[in-house]
Structure formats: C-alpha cells, structure tokens
Image (spheres, helix red, strand yellow):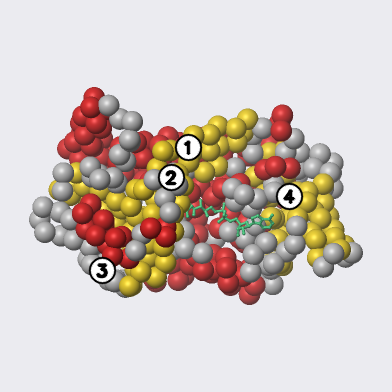
Amino acid sequence: MAKFETQVGIIGAGPAGLMLSHLLHQHGIASIVLEARQRTYCEERVRAGVLEHTSVEMLRNAGVSERLEREGLRHEGIELGLRGQLHRIPFVELTGKAVTVYGQQEVVKDLIARRLSDGGDLRFECGEVSLHDLRGSRPWIGVERQGNVDVIACDYIAGCDGFHGVSRSSFPQEALTVYDRTYPFAWLGILADAAPSREELVYMHHERGFALYSMRSPRITRLYLQCKPDEDIAEWSDDRIWSELHARLECLDGWQPTEGKILQKGVTGMRSFVVEPLQFGRLFLAGDAAHIVPPTGAKGMNLAIADVHYLAEGLRARYRENDCTKLDAYSATCLRRIWEAQRFSWWMTSLLHLFADASPFDCRRQMAELEYVVSSRAAATTLAENYVGLPLH
Ligand code: RFL
Ligand code: PHB
C-alpha cells in the first residue's frame, strides 16, 4: 500500500476532470487525476463535437485554446430541415455569437498534453476506486493496484467519472433526488472519411426519423440517424446506412451527403437525467456523473466544462480567502444552468424526432412548431441563444 496526499482528488480524465485539474493548477491548487482507462482510449473516444461560444471562451481564458483556434471550425449558424427544405438559423446575426466544431477527443488531447507539460499528476489505468470519509475534513480515495489499495488523502474529491462512474453511487441513496427520462429512440452515429459537402450542421426532421449531418474537420463527416433504442448495429451494413442517410437528408434543391469510408459506427441511447444536489460532504459531482442530456442540443460537454468552471472558482475562494460561500453554492449554481440545458435539449429532441406513439394531432403540432421556429425571428433567436450557450450566472 502506498499513501499519497493532495488537495483535490479527481476521479475521471474526461473533459470535466481534466479541465478541473488544469484550472486548479492555474489557481495554485494541487490535484491528482485517477482514470480507469488507458490514455489512448481517452484520447480516441469519439463523442461530442460542438463547443458553445461560452466553452470556447472558458478554454481561451484558461490558455488551452491554441490548437482549437487553429483547427476548430467556426460555425455561424445551423440549418433546420423540414419537408426536404433547409432553413438557416443565423446565430451570429441573432445573438452576435458562434459555436466551434472541435471534437471532444481533441479537447481531451489538448488538456492531457497541457497537464503533463505542467507536471500534472494524471494516473491512467487505475484499478477499482472507492471513496471514504466524505463527511470528514480529510476524505480519502482507495485505488486498487495489483492486489493492494493505495490511499490518496485529500481535502476535497471531485467526481468527474461520467454516467457509469463510482462517485454518484458513493452518495447515500437518501441524499440524492434523481430526475430521469428515457426516450423511445436512440442515435446510430457514424464517422466517415468524406469531405463535408455543406458548411454547417443540418438537423433534419423527416418522416422516416430524424437525421443529423455534422462534421469534424474539412475531411471528416459525422452523421447520425434516429433508430430504435435497442437497434442492433450488426444489422446495419455500410450500404444500408448510406441509403438511409440519403433517404432522410436529400433535399429538394438536390443536396445530398457525400459518401466515404465509414471509419466508426455505434448506437447511443437518449436520456435526460439529473441528480440533486451535486454535493455530499466533501464530494462534488461534475459533468456526466451528475447529468445526461440527449445530444440533440449539443450540450453535454459544454455543461461539463461549465460545472468545473464553478467548482474551480469555489475552490479558489476557499483556498485563497478561506471563503466557502461559492463552494457551498456550487450545487445550486450549476443546477440553474443544468436545467436550462435540460429544457433546451428536451425541446430540440421533441421538435425534431419522430415519436412512434404520436397522434395525428401531435404530428401537426410538431410541424407547426418547426414552421414557427424557421419563420419567426423571435423563435429562431430563442433557439440560437440557447445553442451558442447562455451566459454564465
Ligand atoms: P466522460 O467524458 O464520460 O469522462 C468520464 C471519465 O471517467 C472515467 N471513469 C473512471 N475513472 C476512474 N474510476 C472509475 N470508476 C471511472 N469510471 C469512469 C471514464 O473512463 C472517463 O474517461 O465525462 P465528462 O468529463 O463529464 O464529459 C461529458 C461528455 O463526455 C459528454 O457530456 C458528451 O460527450 C455528450 N455529447 C455531446 N456534448 C456536447 O457538448 N456536444 C455534442 O455535440 C455532444 N454530442 C455527446 C454527443 C455524447 C454522445 N455519446 C456517445 C454519449 C454525441 C454523442 C453520440
Ligand atoms: C456531433 O458532431 O457529434 C454532434 C453535433 C451536434 C449535436 C450532436 C452531436 O447536436
């Protein structure tokens, strides 16, 4: 058994854990990051792709935006498709702000490289992690290593270990309220070696189901199809995927997605999930450990970054000025933004997907709402200001 000491023990090296460790370092606060997976797994896992204006500003202020500003694709709007016609929502015109398409794994790569060059303590391939004495003044983390358990004594623990991590389940059950909703569909996502043939993302409403046209770089396209929640990816040959993408995305003006070799494919479930509060004793949850949004609003990674911004501010005030006000307010502060993002993600999801149990009335109401969003400046502004990211409180 080995014993280690640090100020903040961080579980998970996703965007939340890495960004927190970096921000704390900038505030002169030490941390150790414990990650179950290999470094390459963290750096290669294809997930989110859209950074809000607010997230880009946070990364810039934290001095980790150099490659993002060079390689990220600035998007000044998105397109909403209905009845085969595309309607642009011009973000910059409506809000003065844009979003940036930059893969989550690129953010993770940048943060890992920066933590390591700053001498950060990142421990990959950790064995089982357990959390102890959360209500005391010196909580500790047990980390299994080759049959032994290392002990990491901390002042605080940040649970940034995603939806399936151990942190949330370390709360006593009665200390948490869970808000949960699953949707009766999932997304089949592919990454294709094809140059994007449109400049902006296309969110397409279609009678065969929703489809999303996105991208990662000037050479790589990212596409999604609404599918069954229990869809078997083995039943989707590359040909079948492309033919379904064509059926849903082709527009009356003749536009269609360009095909290319499928580099990766997978099915992602859709759910809305929040736990309250985000704090128990000296344990704080951040990112997917505390909340999940359906990806239609592109909010997941952005919320994770906002959470750790507030957590780092709270810890800074606590260490610098011995002022716990912000730290004590962490959960309530985050939850305001989390619920704003939940509402928006739920709304985008219900606006664009095909619901198998929808009545003819529901279908006409959904179409009327889409028509309203693409024809009213006020409605489009509501979408735009949420998509680019509401200001921090
Ligand atoms: P992560 O990224 O899941 O990282 C958690 C890390 O913790 C590790 N871990 C453990 N480590 C040690 N001990 C344990 N017991 C552990 N258990 C787990 C894991 O290995 C992992 O490395 O959580 P984090 O940091 O909170 O980040 C959240 C984001 O990953 C997530 O919200 C987004 O990917 C969601 N998301 C999107 N978000 C956006 O903002 N914009 C998007 O465009 C967007 N698109 C998406 C998405 C998520 C998707 N999927 C696959 C769920 C599109 C998709 C398809
Ligand atoms: C993506 O590029 O992966 C992506 C973009 C927008 C979304 C969800 C995912 O709403």
Disc 3 is placed on an element classified as loop
Q: Residue at x 39, y 54 (%)?
A: 188
Q: Residue 331 at x, y = what percent?
A: 62, 37
Amino acid type, callout 3: Glu
Q: Amino acid at mark 1?
A: Thr
Task: Bin the neighbour count of mark 2 within 10 Å (Cα to Cα): few under 14, some 14-19, many 20 and up.
Answer: some
Left-right relation of 46 to 31: left
Q: Nearer the viewer, mark 4 or mark 1?
A: 1
* Secondary structure of the residue carrying numbered label 2: loop
Look at mark 3 in the image and give the residue it sits on.
259
Q: Which residue is mark 2?
A: 229
| Quadrant in the picture for residue 71 | bottom left
Residue behind mark 4: 157
Of marks 2 and 1, the one in the foreground: 2
* Residue drawn where x is 73% and y is 42% of the image: 170
Which amino acid type is marked by label 4? Ile
**Is label 2 in contact with label 1 (beta carbons under 8 Å)?**
yes
Measured in 3D between alpha carbons, the distance from the residue under mark 3 to the one under mark 2, in whole angstroms, is 25 Å
Q: Amino acid at mark 2?
A: Pro
Question: Which residue matches tag 1?
Answer: 182
Taking the image as drawn, is residue 19 in sight? no
